[in-house]
Image (tube, rainbow, N blue to C red):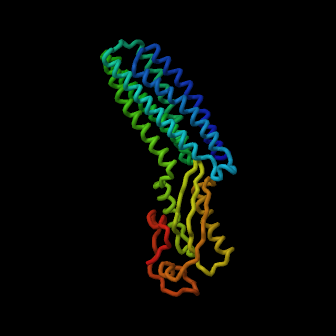
Amino acid sequence: MNRAAQNFKIQKYIAFLSVILFILKVTAWYITHSVAILTDALESIVNVIAGFVGLYSLYVSAKPKDQDHPYGHGKVEFISAAIEGVLIAVAGVMIIREAVYNLYHPQEIHQLDKGIYLVLLTAIVNYVAGSICVRTGKKNNSLALIASGKHLISDTYTTFGIVTGLSLIYFTKIWWIDSVVAIVFALLILYTGYKIIRSSVAGMMDEADVELLEKMVLLLNENRKENWVDLHNLRIIKYGPMIHLDCHLTVPWYLNVHEAHNEVESLSKLVKSHFGESVELFVHSDGCLDFSCKICDKKDCTKRIHSFEKKIKWSMQNISSDNKHQI
């Protein structure tokens, strides 16, 4: 099963699971009349909507490239994540509004023990489902799946906090604690929504993925071949599950076309062996120039003009530079 299909399958399960969990939370609220549980149920409405939005985005993202979308449809995942982030933020605001109202108009809570058991069950299920989403999303480079997973995990933390508050109410009978707990975790929900919106905007604006670049630079330094005189102008763009990477590879100028191509293929195989087939490489090969001798440690080069002086270690900064490296 390819990565896009795997992402879609998991998100499909998450979407239908969110409906079941929403029903359980509404049931818990109906039997308890707890505003904290009501806020958890309100967030679950967002889970349901976001689950199906994420499902549709992954369906679109999995479509093959076409004439109108030569790089594929992966960018839709950033839009999906942005929508989910906004919905989470809206849910946070609604929760605060309801909790503040209830703070001034407190209501007695009923059958807390049953409500706690039901809500706790949803928290455990959410955490397991969210962890699977995040783990699979990171492996398959799917922002939509990661966003869904983080949302579910944040929902778990919120629910555990609510359960703690409800347990305190159960033993103390202090009803206003219900509203305070709801407000505290609504603020956590707002922060989660902000982070998801921030990451989706970064993806739409093609912001550099620092973590991915660091891994890439480490891999290239550890497996550098002697014919790879220099590497520069490295660019990484993410389109949903696909990573598009282009760079300039400097090789000895006297290599023929086939030999230079073999070096490019060697670089491509190295990257794909570590990052998977979801990486698409576009490598431009350059011939070395006179000043390249000083940074080239090729042992048996018969065309050398200058003595080797220093090997330049590739870093995130110099590997992204537009110019060839020189001393």
Q: Residue furthest front?
A: 68
Task: Give the quarter of the figure containing the N terminus.
Answer: top right
Residue at the location (37% across, 26% down)?
Answer: 96
Viewer-side residue, 122 vs 203: 203
Viewer-side residue, 53 vs 205: 205
In the picture, residue 266 is in which quadrant? bottom right
Give above or below for 259 relative to 46. Answer: below
At which x and y percent is residue 17?
Answer: 57, 28
At which x and y percent is residue 41?
Answer: 47, 23
At which x and y percent is residue 201?
Answer: 48, 45
Give above or below for 137 relative to 183. Answer: below
Q: Is residue 242 left or right of residue 214?
A: right
Residue at the location (49% across, 81% down)?
Answer: 291
Q: How many marks?
A: 0
Q: Is residue 309 left or right of residue 243?
A: left
Residue at the location (58% across, 73% down)?
Answer: 286
Task: Give the quarter of the figure containing the C terminus.
Answer: bottom left
Q: Is residue 114 left or right of residue 78?
A: left
Give above or below for 2 relative to 296. Answer: above
